[in-house]
Amino acid sequence: MSLRCGIRRIRGQQPWASSGWVNGSRRPSSVGFQQFRSVASTPTAEKVLFPGALNSRFTNTMEFIRPALRTEAIPTYRVMDQSGQVLDKEVGVDTEDDLALELYRNMVCLSIMDLLMFEAQRQGRLSFYMVSAGEEGIAIGSASAFSPSDVIFCQYRESGVFMQRGFTLDQFMNQLFANSKDAGLGRNMPVHYGSHELNIHTISSTLATQIPHAAGAAYALKMQNQQQPDIAPRIAVCYFGEGAASEGDFHGALNIAATRQVPCIFICRNNGYAISTPTSDQYRGDGIASRGAGYGMDTLRVDGNDIFAVRRATKEARRLALENGGKPVLIEMMAYRVGHHSTSDDSFAYRQKVEVDDWKRRDNPITRLRKWLEGRGLWDEDKERDIRNRLRKEVLTAFEKAEKEKKPPMQHVFDGVYEHLTQEQKTHMEELSDILQRYPKEYDTEQYEGGAAAFRKFCEQNR
Amino acid sequence: MPPKTPIRTLSRYLFRPQSSLHPRCQHRPRSQRYSSAAAGARLNGTVEYDTTPLLSHSSRSALSNAELPADVRQGQTKRINLYTAVNEALRHALQTDERVLVFGEDIQFGGVFRCTMNLATDFGTERVFNTPLSEQGLVGFAIGAAAEGMRPVAEVQFADYVFPAFDQLVNEAAKYRYRSAATGVSCGGLVIRMPTGVVGHGALYHSQSPESLFTHVPGLRVIIPRSPLQAKGLLLSAIHTNDPVIFMEPKVLYRAAVEQVPVDAYQLPLDKAEVVKPGKDVTIVSYGTPLYTCSAAIAAAEKDFGCSVELIDLRTIYPWDRETVLESVKKTGRAIVVHESMMNAGVGAEVAATIQERTFLRLEAPVKRVTGWATHTGLVFEKFIVPDVTRVYDAIKKTIDY
Ligand SMILES: Cc1ncc(C[n+]2csc(CCOP(=O)(O)OP(=O)(O)O)c2C)c(N)n1
Ligand SMILES: [Mg+2]
């Protein structure tokens, strides 16, 4: 199509004169800056008719937008203060006591698992680990606001999402040990969990790649929500760090999510660091939340240390995401990365220990909820000691059990690349099997389920 | 595996503040811990960096390198590892050429592999700085800076994460000179460094060696050094050349490979492969980490079969030194190509096809490829996928017996 003919087509359709042209037919009736319509197209019009900015008025003051001069940042939503006092008694915490206790238990469980696994890695029993310290409330609080059928994409520091959705300690440990019971078949690095039953896609190490996936998945869900009206509508959810939000994938994802109006919640965990890079080297705008407006997206910034705020914000975001057939929502959850980036990192090479200690003392999602529970008479020192002992034992039991399991069978070196093995792969399998047979002493195949014999059999079956 | 502490003692750490956990340096090689060698292995697990003939263990052997300029050969050497050699090359470049810039994700504090240690402190954050987390952004930024006369050395944190920048490298860096044509503009002076290869526990996204995706693209130079001495000289040449360079550093060698390296600055040729061990019966062509595997396999094979094997380090993977390889194969009549990444459309395919085209009548055996298989690097399966001493040893045997 030539450029000129394209212009003619647009003119002919008079798109801005028809109702809600921006994204097909189902549009909210409220008029936003992208939805302005029926302006007189006269030389004296007060507003601009340029198709790229429909509701812009003319001005003869030359005023650059200068975000650097703004003194007020986007506010951070809270439900309770640092001492666990609820700020708006009318609204309350919007969470039943039982659920509050469950959220607390899961946060404590996650932090205990983190401490133990971090140390297990130091002892050389795991190859790698990443803790969630300081961000437990974000993962667990937000996950508590979703339907189990919602579809989730994670970065890697969201073990709490898995835990809150029912991933068991055994499942965590099997993945960490990459044993024969690991749903990842021993292929992925520790903490790259995934669960089909829990509707959480398997984690990839490549940053930000999951963000456009979430947009596309949400579009699939939008179509399915329309096509299957008797099934409860679903949304997609995507977690990522403020560092990952610098990737092109983030920008592409938010833009396409907005133009296609997909039911997706984008949850940024802004923990102040991307490995060693502080946010001051990462961006100059007002955090990640400021970008939501740029993409025409409902956006909220939330105190990640306040699990009730996280929960309420996420619940409301889910409602918005399903409004009028679907739209994306961005939530920026503020936190501080208390732990090292991972077991491969020593963060004191780039930040002061006092900075970390300060933060730990100042605020923390677990102690804040504990203060609230105590204030309400739901928690005390004995209960605390009890639950910590019990959870520690549970983690250790699962750990010991998983450590004893064999590795997955060797066929998983090759299967799963394609739906079916290729000719070339079959040749490679034969070559490997032949080497294993002729040099048995060179390889420890016994730690793999069925050993070399099972692999040979697999090769024979696939000749 | 290290000795096992009873798991219950782990619980002691539970209530301790996290800071009491002894911090470690970044990515300390744990490859030995998760070593692939079986208890009774004779071949696998015999790569000894302390004694391998591939590294200069004495000052004299380092200075006997005929590729070094005469004045450097009169100078001093220092025993350093590969990341320090990279650091020294960057330091020298920053010191001697104000057009040089060093940047990338997390490089300001020294980088996750410590290659840029102290550079920001010593040269200032105008020239040595953190970038936001975007490979396409930082590589494109480097291309623009190079096109306007600077000599940017940009780091991509892992070769596995270069793909967001693939468009910038393939469509922009590689074609800049050709597209700009008679306008005379190019992005020469551009170097993109990245750690590459397996380390024992990197799984799908910390193990890849994507060199063949770049060797397919005329306009890019692809270099992989095997040792500290090589890394220093090749990196300085890369910064000096007026072609864009992809410089891939085998990350398992950052700490493992330690040798005597001249203290003075020097450059090594970008158009020469190096015969690192002469031989008569078989030629093995490789580069990077697998050279150590080959060297150990050759030692065992020469002892067991009484053969003589020539080992060639390609060094510059593209454009590559066909002459040195072809001369060698014309002499030995047999060739094996060894690399870590997958066989399909890999560097081995190109080298083997060239050997076959140009030395067909001299060949006594088919050119063999010992490479990764047609799969991904599953965490617990790495040792079965990447060429090991046994597979190279067996390839020598088969090629000789053919
Ligand atoms: C494409 C890509 N580039 C670089 C990396 C290396 N890397 C892993 S985590 C990380 C920092 C991520 O920071 P952020 O998104 O803020 O998440 P956080 O670790 O703070 O939770 C980097 C640079 C990667 N995994 N993928
Ligand atoms: Mg972060």
Image (tube, rainbow, N blue to C red):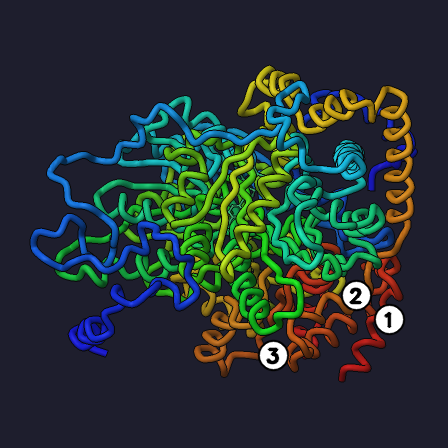
Where does the image place residue A214, in percent across and percent down from the top left? 55, 57
Q: Residues within 10 Å of mark 1 (few under 14, many from 20)?
A: some
Give whichever of A149, A26 is nearer the camera. A26
Write down the quadrant of residue B68 in the picture: top left
Where does the image place residue B214, in percent across and percent down from the top left? 43, 61
Residue B282 seen: yes
Q: Secondary structure at mark 1?
A: helix
- The span from disc 1 to disc 2 (Cα, nearest Å) is 8 Å
> Mark 1 or 2 closer to N-term?
2
Residue depicted at 82% across the width and 42% down the height: B1
Name the kind of residue labelled 3 in the image: Ala
Q: Which residue is labeled 2 in the image?
A: A410
Q: From the viewer's perspective, is A245 left or right of B189? A: right
Residue A454: assigned label: 1
Name the kind of residue labelled 2 in the image: Met
Q: Which residue is labeled 3 in the image?
A: B365
Name the kind of residue labelled 1 in the image: Ala
Residue A122 seen: no
